[in-house]
Amino acid sequence: MSRLCFALFSKAKNSSNLLYDGNQFGNRFTNTSRLFLRPNYVRNHRPNVVLFRTSPRSSINPIFALLLKTKGIKVLKGVSIVFGRSFRKWHDKLPKEMQEQLTRHRISLSFLSFTLVYIGYYSYMHFDTCPLTGRKRWISFTKDQILALSEMNYQQLVNEYESKIVNRDSELFQKCQTIVNTLVSRNSDMDLVKNIKWNLNVVNDDSVNNAFVLPSGEIFVFTGILKLLDSWEELAVIIGHEMSHALLGHVQEQQSFLAFGEILMVPVLSFIWFLFEDFAAFIVYSIQQLIYPLIFEVGFNLPFSRKLEVEADEVGLTLAAKACYDPRWSVLLWDKMALKEACDQFAGETVGEMEYISTHPSHERRAFLLEEKLPDATITRIKCKCPELSKTENPLEKAHSLRKLTVNIRERVRIRTEIVSLEKKLAEHSTTEEEQTLKHLKLKHQKLEKEFEGMTLKNVEQKVTDKLNILDSWMRNFKGFFKTSSFKSFPSLGNETELTSVLGQCKSPATNISLIK
């Protein structure tokens, strides 16, 4: 058995002796299967030897390698079960004296030690340094494999949205292309940016509020996300964020993290089938199959995903700042998203998602973290000799005003839920204490409604209008707002009725709130 393990290990090690390129690219895939692979880390090096070939070097097809390694880890898990069961059968057939001797030598402890050494060595051999941030991480995907998957994903997207791709001569496409060109050119001092061929695709689909970048550099922007924006600065922040996923190799890292979770199960499965008899082992194995994925997802994978999103936010903010965009709009962007989410919850269209079961941090948290990074982003703009930020139009003022509205709406949603629950309870059995509690909740809800009616952006917007003298119509309704001179350079963006109708459900009919979209 030891010879067999050594032979398998030697083959696995030799298969990884390919040229490793440190430039790794990654991003989120749409409906991409979780493939778990080993990386190509080690370059074969023979000093003073000249290698001569009459034909070009050939290598295994990346897609075939993906399938081979994916099936391989499933086979490895099956082998671990067979190994554990066979070892138990062999142990049970030993004389009692021999079994006691093995027990005295703490065979279980030895097995655990071997497992820890195996995990430690495997982790060490696959550690890498994250580009741009210097963070240590575990990588098992190769660049070629990721690019091969990216090409497949790109073809699927093109086939799906072929009839909705915006013409490259259109004004909307040209404006988006200008943002991409600016981000790339102003960050061309980084080799990672220069080594990717960035290509923009604008998709005319208002039902999709998304933008993403594939590892190959294919940028997709859906018109649905544009209707939520108020300026091109916000779009620059979004594209910068998505480009950061590609530059940082996040898809490689996240899929490798999932692979590591699968690899951890190999020794665990052997231990289960060694420790328990067949029927008991099957029961334990079945329970493990139900519990382990949940524990790994909530306890490790989701927090890890949120960590990558925060990292992409920070790097994306730097990219936008170097391109001389106003980084303060990033804070306003996520505060605006938080307000829309709160209004959707108030209207009963969505249920609030707890952050610890989400792949992304909450909108409020992202706005808060980005605001903390604004001083660094401002210094970056100064170093890049960008124009001074406007002192009269400050997106942070609007962001802070939206933040107050969001807090108010979320608190009202919470209280309303308590009121409904308590009313149902009182319908079955009424007590004086519960009736007093219900009365108190209703009074608190009414107070919040009045505060909401008084929390308009009128004062803040009026100050900005007075200073700039170009925002004189900000206090009009949304339809008039999108016709103001301040957005003449923002063609075909914005659906002025969407958030208006949503906000109408968050306020009383008497309230007249003029609000940025």
Image (cartoon, rainbow, N blue to C red):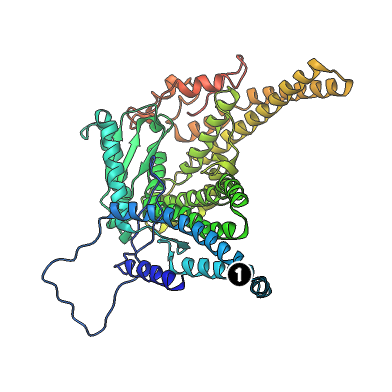
Measured from the top left, where is residue 315 in percent x and y? 43, 53
Q: Residue at x 53, y 33 (%)?
A: 463
Q: Find disc 1 in the rendering and name its residue.
A: 94
Measured from the top left, where is residue 328 in percent x and y? 48, 44
Question: Visible in this render: residue 180?
Answer: yes
Q: Amino acid under label 1?
A: Leu
Q: Splitting the image into 4 quarters, where does residue 352 fall?
A: top right
- Asked whether 56 or 498 is in front, the reply is 56
- Asked whether 48 or 381 is in front, the reply is 48
Q: Is residue 255 above or below residue 134?
A: above
Measured from the top left, where is residue 124 in percent x and y? 47, 69
Question: Visible in this render: residue 217?
Answer: no
Q: Describe the element under mark 1 as helix, strand or loop.
A: loop
Q: Is residue 14 above or below residue 64?
A: below
- Mark 1 surroundings within 10 Å by alpha-carbon count, few (fewer than 14), some (14 through 19), many (20 or more): few
Q: Splitting the image into 4 quarters, where does residue 207 fall?
A: top left
Measured from the top left, where is residue 12 in percent x and y? 37, 66
Q: Is residue 29 above or below residue 254?
A: above
Q: Is residue 221 above or below residue 4?
A: above
Q: Is residue 49 left or right of residue 484?
A: left
- Asked whether 329 or 69 is in front, the reply is 69
